[in-house]
Amino acid sequence: MTNAGKRNWLLDVIMLPIGLITFFPFYLIVINTFKSMKETATSPMSLPKDWVFTNYAAVFEETGLLRSFSNSLIITATSVLLMVLIGAMAAYPVVFNPNRMNRAITVYLLAGFMIPFQTTLIPLFQLMTDFKLIDSLYGLIILYMGGAVFVFFLVMGYMKTIPKELGEAAIIDGCGIGGIFWRIILPLLKPITVTSIIFQTMWIWNDFLAPMLFLNSKSNATLVLQVYTAKGEFSVNWPMFMTLTVITLVPIFIFFIIMQKQIVKGIVGGAIKG
């Protein structure tokens, strides 16, 4: 066996138990969705003795699951679209028209980006209350638009690799500033744009803190908030809790599987060009 073969064999031996450890929580969650409340409490790690398929039907009957799915979809899709557009448009003048003001704006955004979200919760809540955006899907979308700063820095690093001569040639041909951005620059940003969309989609879909604080009514609840409907004051309906968790994770899991190649392309492409 060659040295390369030995290294691969050793890597497989190391990664197998790590993979099993990572897989175990998913196994535990999924397998308990097919158990009764009693069996979940007495033997949570074993396979079901009597397979129960009514937990999924009960979840749809007892919770507003479809409405919550629609809320999560609207919030995620709209927020990500606005974040990507605002982040890319903000990076465009900073990269292609560097001056003292643009550099100051970049430093200002970097300083704000470094402040943890948790430290701003009280003033944010007061601000949302003053503008009557509490318990509003649109209010939460506006809040999430702050994530455009993350997109701004991702796109800015990638955009610096685009030759400025492309814009200069377009101006000579009579193309305006807006036309250069939409027709030339934005299409060239596809790899890093797709990567930004994936990261931000996974963040917003799985976010619990912001919806819990700023959404109060059941009609505006997201899927992640619906998981808490299984939690009572003194007890937890574990089969329902696990079932809601699986239903919440399945869409984003499928999304990640489909888009994982794009993540690698975007990151590797940016690294190579940088």
Image (tube, rainbow, N blue to C red):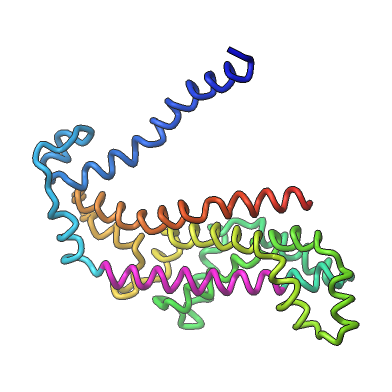
Residue 228 rendering spot, x and y as whole percentages: 29, 58
Quarter-of-image position of residue 146 = bottom right
Task: Determine which quarter of the picture holds residue 137.
Answer: bottom left
Tell me which residue sits at (44%, 26%) in the image. 16
Q: Main secondary structure of the magenta part?
A: helix
Name which quarter of the figure residue 105 lies in: bottom right
- Count of numbered labels shown in the rendering: 0
Q: Is residue 87 magenta?
A: yes
- In the image, the segment drawn in magenta is 65-89
In the displayed structure image, the side of residue 137 where residue 97 appears, left or right: right
Viewer-nearest residue: 272 or 198: 272
Quadrant in which the N terminus is drawn: top right
In this view of the protein, which residue sits in the foreground, 104 or 158? 158
Give coordinates of residue 203: x percent, y percent.
50, 58
Q: Residue at x 74, y 59 (%)?
A: 158
Q: Residue at x 30, y 73 (%)?
A: 67
